[in-house]
Image: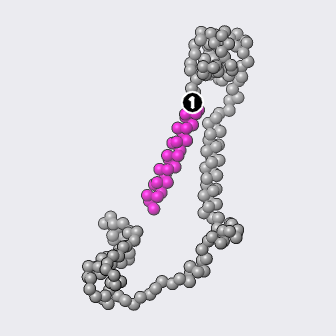
Amino acid sequence: MLSSKSNRIILIASAVLVVILIAYAFLRDTAKVASLNDVEVMLESKQVEKVTASKEYFYLKTDHGLYKITASQVTPELFLNQKVQFDSGSNILIWVFILVLVLGGASFTFRFWLKHRLIFDNSPKLKASTVDISAAEAVMPVKSDVTFADIGGITDVKEELEEIIDFLKNPVRYRNFGARMPRGVLLVGPPGVG
């Protein structure tokens, strides 16, 4: 149970890290810094397709890529022949955060629905695919009055089976020594020994 919980925590932490790395990759400023002379040359040769202004930079989109120049270097006469669009100020990080919240809520809702769909869904197709509970309750375990004292022969097999039974009755004692619960027991022997 502990390893399952730690695996889930590691999985969630890894998912958060991946989302942060993807957000950083898409949201970082990849524009190249241009000097005032470079911007003047681009404007004179009519390479600039679009100019966007933010608080700190003016971004120039060209055929060769995206360039930026600090707002303190820009004079009002520099972009007289260009239409300047102003950044609306909406932060894309807020939209990414809202998207993560919506996806997380949808994931939680879907997991809740999968866990409780037998309670909420009354469709006949679902009822036909489920196991009849009344038939499962009718199966009773077999009670045997045969003990190990009644079995003759193969003493080492009897000792190993007694160890398994003791392990099932007292699992804490064995767990203290580092033993794990077996997933099953394979009984092998010649035919007829039961």
Q: Secondary structure at mark 1?
A: loop
Magenta stretch? 1-28
Give percent across and percent down for residue 61: 64, 21
Q: Quadrant of the C terminus?
A: bottom left
| Residue type pointed to by label 1 | Arg
Pinpoint residue 65: horizontal percent, then vertical percent.
60, 21
Residue drawn at 52 percent across, 49 percent down: 12
Q: Answer with left or right where residue 6 lies relative to residue 47.
A: left
Q: Relative to 127, does residue 83 appear above or below in the rendering?
A: above
Q: Quadrant of the N terminus?
A: bottom left
Q: Evaluate whether residue 57 shows in this view.
A: no
Mark 1 residue crowding within 10 angstroms, few (<14) / some (14–19) / many (20+): few
Please state the horizontal and vertical placement of residue 46, each as a whole percent of the image.
68, 13
Residue name at image x 65 percent, y 15 percent: 47
Q: Position of residue 143 (x, y in %)?
A: 44, 87
Tell me the quarter of the picture where residue 37 sits.
top right
Asked whether the viewer can see residue 117, the reply is yes
Most foreground residue, 9 or 38: 38
Give left or right: position of 30 versus 124. Answer: left
Question: Which residue is drawn at the image coordinates 56% and 26% (left, top)?
Answer: 30
Height in image: 135 above or below 117? below
Rendered view: 25 above or below 72: below
Magenta span has 76? no
Location of mark 1 (residue): 28
Work out whether residue 9 or residue 116 is closer to the camera in this orientation and state it. Answer: 116
Relative vertical location of residue 23 with respect to residue 173 in this rendering, above or below: above
Q: Nearer the viewer, residue 165 or 5?
A: 165
Question: Is 7 within the magenta?
Answer: yes
Q: How many marks?
A: 1
Specify the principal SS of the magenta part. helix
